[in-house]
């Protein structure tokens, strides 16, 4: 299952991706499928570990091209902070961001509806940078 959304600026490998929520930045590696093969989101798999509505969540950002200069694993980011650039890493048909949000309950991970989740968040002041 795809479990997220794909969004992007066609042809752009320099589009800045901002964090949709404040939390801890984690530079994770891409997960594997049950058979051990990579899921295809690229070798770097930026994550934001946060709390939303009293629940621990992880925001996953796939296919990123580069991490924002100076951003390090474990850094605290705010909503609207530049965290990475859009890319084509992994299995990709062109520049875009794969975004999914997950929460854990009873030892099992579940996907949130990303569009509904994004619509529930305040819009950062710099979300419309061009």
Image (cartoon, rainbow, N blue to C red):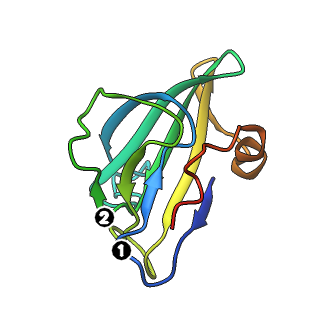
Q: Nearer the viewer, residue 93 or 32?
A: 93
Q: Determine which residue is flagged by label 1.
A: 13
Tell me if mark 1 has few (under 14), some (14-19) or many (20+) residues whose alpha carbon lies within 10 angstroms of its own. Answer: some
SS at mark 1? loop
The numbered mark, 2 or 1, whose residue comes first in the sequence reads 1
Q: Are marks 2 and 1 in contact (CB under 8 Å)?
A: yes
For residue 76, above or below residue 35 = above
Residue 51 image-quadrant placement: top right
Residue 117 image-quadrant placement: top right
The image position of residue 53, as x and y in percent, is: 72, 21
Q: Residue at x 41, y 78 (%)?
A: 12
Residue 2 image-quadrant placement: bottom right
Q: Is residue 1 visible?
A: no
Label placed on residue 65: 2
Q: Residue at x 35, y 57 (%)?
A: 38
Q: Quadrant of the N terminus?
A: bottom right
| Number of numbered discs overlaid on the protein picture | 2
Tell me if mark 2 has few (under 14), some (14-19) or many (20+) residues whose alpha carbon lies within 10 angstroms of its own. Answer: many
The image position of residue 22, as x and y in percent, is: 51, 30
For residue 50, above or below residue 69 = above
Q: Is residue 17 visible?
A: yes
Q: CA distance from mark 2 to mark 1?
A: 7 Å
């Amino acid at each position: 299952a795809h479990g997220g959304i794909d969004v992007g600026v066609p042809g752009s490998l320099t589009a800045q991706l901002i964090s949709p929520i404040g939390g801890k930045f984690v530079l994770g590696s891409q997960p594997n499928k049950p058979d051990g093969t990579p899921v295809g989101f690229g070798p770097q798999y930026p994550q934001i570990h946060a709390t939303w509505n009293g629940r621990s969540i992880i925001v996953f950002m796939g296919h990123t091209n580069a991490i924002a200069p100076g951003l390090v694993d474990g850094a605290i980011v705010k909503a609207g902070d530049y965290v990475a650039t859009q890319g084509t890493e992994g299995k990709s048909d062109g520049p875009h961001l794969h975004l999914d949000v997950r929460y854990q309950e009873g030892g099992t991970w579940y996907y949130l509806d990303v569009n509904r989740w994004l619509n529930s968040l305040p819009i950062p002041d710099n979300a419309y940078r061009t």
